[in-house]
Image: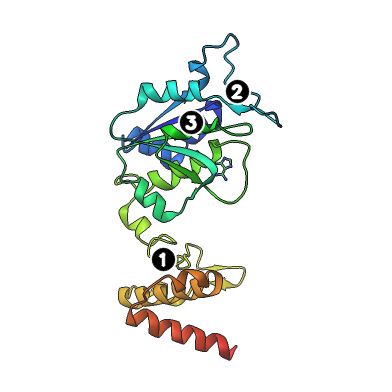
Amino acid sequence: MKIDILTLFPEMIEGFLNTSIIKRAIASEVATIDIHNFRDFSTEKHHHVDDTPYGGGQGMVLQVMPIVECLKTITTPESIVVLMSPQGRTFSHQVAQEFATFKHLIIICGHYEGFDERVRDYVDMEVSIGDYVLTGGELSSMVICDATIRLLEGAIRQSSHEDDSFANGLLEYPQYTRPYEYDGNTVPDILLTGHHENIRKWRLYKSLEKTYNYRPDLLEKLELTDEQNKMLAQIIENKEKQ
Ligand code: ADE
């Protein structure tokens, strides 16, 4: 997958590209990421990319020309252009799965008070990472790249994200590693039995239990299997007894 990020602050993103799983994904060519500073496309004397809003008002607005000229140098018929903005469609695991199917993703990061509205004529979609306003789109572009790249084949073991929270609509079951006992707390013994079917059932039960306790809204959206429904009934019964 090829990703291009348009930003005025490449240094914010460089550390991310040089760390851990993303660094490895780039080294093994699972993903290529190029950063473009759209300030380079300003034709103004001091390379300004923003100006005061027509009609007056607070703050500075990003100009349309540098962004669109930058886009023109990288866009192909396969490109999907995404604008980072709090107005956009909310990012989720499902959106990450959709993005992971794209061949070429272009992400535009804003800064200051926002974009000249005409930028929107050149984008395929607007994406927000949540209902709050950040000082710029750089952090959100990294969130999107991270969640998307880890889903690409070869980035991490396939089985690692089959059990991700949200992948099957449920939160992930609890995980443990050595030591067996810490501060009087031990690892559930079933995980030491080597009995795969019992471990699968235990994990499914715990996954349902966590989802019921922390995110019951997720359960409402799911069509549970018979096995899951029986477990959920048990979870509710146990909770009522407490
Ligand atoms: N830019 C500023 N706030 C943002 C948000 N919540 N999501 C995406 N991009 C943003």
Residue at mark 1: C-beta within 8 A of ligand 1:
no
The residue sitting at 42% across, 39% down in the picture is: 22
Q: Residue 46: horizontal and vertical position, in percent? A: 60, 11
Q: Quadrant of residue 23?
A: top left
Q: Which residue is mark 1?
A: 169
**Residue drawn at 59 percent across, 34 percent down:** 114
Question: Residue at coordinates 60% horizontally, 72% vertically from top-left?
Answer: 184
The residue singled out by tag 3 in the image is: 119
* Other residues around mark 1 within 10 Å, as few (<14) / some (14–19) / many (≥20): some
Among the two numbered marks 2 and 1 on one chain, the one whose residue lies closer to the N terminus: 2
Q: Which class describes the residues within 10 Å of circle 2: few (<14), some (14-19), or many (20+)? A: many
Nearer-the-camera pick, 25 or 183: 25
User: Distance from label 3 to label 2 (Cα)?
Assistant: 13 Å
Residue 94 in the image: x percent, y percent? 40, 55
The quadrant in which the N terminus is found is: top left
Question: How far across and down, in percent of the image, does residue 196 sit?
Answer: 31, 73
Q: Quarter of the image holding residue 31?
A: top left
Where does ligand 1 appear, by image quarter? Answer: top right
Dot 2: what SS? Answer: strand
Front residue of this view, candidates 129 and 195:
129
- Helix, strand or loop at mark 3: helix
User: Which residue bears the numbered disc 2?
Assistant: 50
- The residue at 58%/8% (across/down) is 45
Q: Secondary structure at mark 1?
A: loop
Q: If you read the primary sequence from the N terminus, does the residue marked by circle 3 or circle 1 appear first?
A: 3
State whether residue 27 is above or below residue 163. above
Q: Nearer the viewer, residue 146 or 91?
A: 91
Distance between mark 2 and mark 1 Cα atoms: 42 Å
* Disc 3/disc 1 C-alpha distance (Å): 35 Å
